[in-house]
Image (cartoon, rainbow, N blue to C red):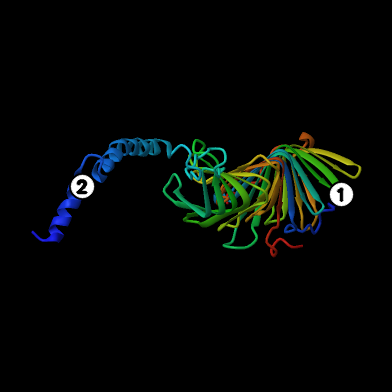
């Protein structure tokens, strides 16, 4: 697959999140966005029904965003591709975007279907697993990092 | 007896003769005294009637200066306790309670302050209505809320429930959270901003810490 336009994406650029409802639970260092949620950071746009943002907050100062968990009609739009899936995880610390479940990827001319798509924001490399059912057997779901 | 004594006795006898000065005096008195008594009595009765410069006054309700409010306090200060016993105070440059049956006090340039373990949280606004029964202040005009944890908001009207230490507004609101700046059509939050719910075109702009994530 081609390299994504997200190569060199600045994961600490400001993140704009729009939603119908936002619930910030400072004690749990979480913010839950529901209802036509749209996350925009630099050239990346992530839409979903519900997104949970987990962050850590040093004593005083800007929050460190750790990850975004999106579920329900997840759609990732970048200048070079458009992908959809049931779940999406944007691991900000490791600069990795992963879509899982009935994933489709439209990139340039190619249209791929699979179970899991991951885009490495450093290299811009996107890899699709479990393509069109041809790949059988060793299908491993990335261990969900429990932090 | 000497002529002097005899003359004096003679004068007295003449005076005592019928028709003498004594009789005339008695006749005059007999008539004059009752008349004088009647006259004085009449004077006594008539005097109050035509006494011109009467200075008694009748207090008329409408012309008396009417205070149009029940209670007015300058530099008012209300103190109370939140439901879990934390102190709060509301100070205002001017506090007016219209009537005694409504426990609502109109405040001008007010400042409500709640103290709890996270530190102080203060709400300032140009005007507000403080309901003394429920300890809710309906503040209006640019409301500023600043709390120790960095939660701040600007809105038109905000209901500040001091007893429950919550802040709600149905009006568009913008503000700041440790996590970033926000805007929404309505807001419900505890006064320290530990839990903030934004609804209706809600937007949160997160400014992540610089550093590791940079390209």
The reply to whether discs 2 and 1 touch (Cβ–Cβ < 8 Å) is: no
Separation of marks 2 and 1 at Cα, in angstroms: 154 Å
**Is A49 displayed left or right of B163 in the figure?**
right
Question: Callout 2: helix, strand or loop?
Answer: helix
Residue A108 is labelled as none
Q: Chain of mark 2?
A: B
Percent x, y of residue A102: 75, 35
Residue occupying image coordinates x 72% and y 55%: A95
The vertical placement of A6 against A106, above or below, is below
Q: Residue furthest right?
A: A109
- Residue B168: image location, x then y, percent: 60, 42
Residue closest to the far bottom: B211
* Chain name for mark 1: A
Circle 1 crowding by C-alpha within 10 Å: few under 14, some 14–19, many from 20: few
Q: Nearer the viewer, residue B111 or B165?
A: B111
Q: Nearer the viewer, residue B209 or B194?
A: B194
From the top left corner, tell me how far across and down residue B65 is, in percent. 55, 45
Residue annotated with mark 2: B14
- Left or right of residue B7, residue B110 in this image: right
Q: Residue B190, relative to residue B30: is it above or below?
A: below
**Local crowd at mark 2 within 10 Å, few (<14), some, or many (≥20)?**
some
Q: Quadrant of residue A117?
A: top right
Check disc 1 and report its element: helix, strand or loop.
loop
Residue, disc 1: A79
The verdict on a common chain for dots 2 and 1 is: no
Q: Give whichever of A138, B177 is nearer the camera.
A: B177
Counting from the top left corner in percent of width and height, residue A113 is at 80, 37
- Please state which of residues B116 and A107 is positioned toward the viewer in this rendering: B116
Please name the residue shown 48% across and 45% down the image.
Answer: B55
């Amino acid at each position: 697959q081609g390299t994504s336009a997200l190569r060199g994406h600045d994961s600490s650029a400001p993140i704009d999140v729009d939603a119908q409802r936002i619930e910030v639970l400072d004690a749990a260092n979480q913010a839950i966005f529901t209802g036509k949620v749209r996350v925009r950071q630099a050239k990346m746009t992530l839409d979903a029904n519900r997104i949970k943002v987990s962050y850590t907050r040093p004593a005083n100062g800007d929050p460190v965003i750790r990850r975004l968990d999106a579920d329900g009609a997840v759609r990732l739009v970048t200048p070079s591709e458009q992908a959809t899936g049931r779940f999406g995880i944007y691991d900000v610390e490791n600069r990795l975007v992963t879509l899982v479940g009935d994933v489709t990827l439209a990139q340039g001319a190619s249209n791929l279907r699979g179970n899991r798509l991951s885009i490495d924001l450093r290299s811009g490399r996107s890899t699709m697993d479990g393509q069109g059912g041809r790949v059988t057997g060793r299908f491993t779901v990335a261990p969900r990092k429990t932090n | 007896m000497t002529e002097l004594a005899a003359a004096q006795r003679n004068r007295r006898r003449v005076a005592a003769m019928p028709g003498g000065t004594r009789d005339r005096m008695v006749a005059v008195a007999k008539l004059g005294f009752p008349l004088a008594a009647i006259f004085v009595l009449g004077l006594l009765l008539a005097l109050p009637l035509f006494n011109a410069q009467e200075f008694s006054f009748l207090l008329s309700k409408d012309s008396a200066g009417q205070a149009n409010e029940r209670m007015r306090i300058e530099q008012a200060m209300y103190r109370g306790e939140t439901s879990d016993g934390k102190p709060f105070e509301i100070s205002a440059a001017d506090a007016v309670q219209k009537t005694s049956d409504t426990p609502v006090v109109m405040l001008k340039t007010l400042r409500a302050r709640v103290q709890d373990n996270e530190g102080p949280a203060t709400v300032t606004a140009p005007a507000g209505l403080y309901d003394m029964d429920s300890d809710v202040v309906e503040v209006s005009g640019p409301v500023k809320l600043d709390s120790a944890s960095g939660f701040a908001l600007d809105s038109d009207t905000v209901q500040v429930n001091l007893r429950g230490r919550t802040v709600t507004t149905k009006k568009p609101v913008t503000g700041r959270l440790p996590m970033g700046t926000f805007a929404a059509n309505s807001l419900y939050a505890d006064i320290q901003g530990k839990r903030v719910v934004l609804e209706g075109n809600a937007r949160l702009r997160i400014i992540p810490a610089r550093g590791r994530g940079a390209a």
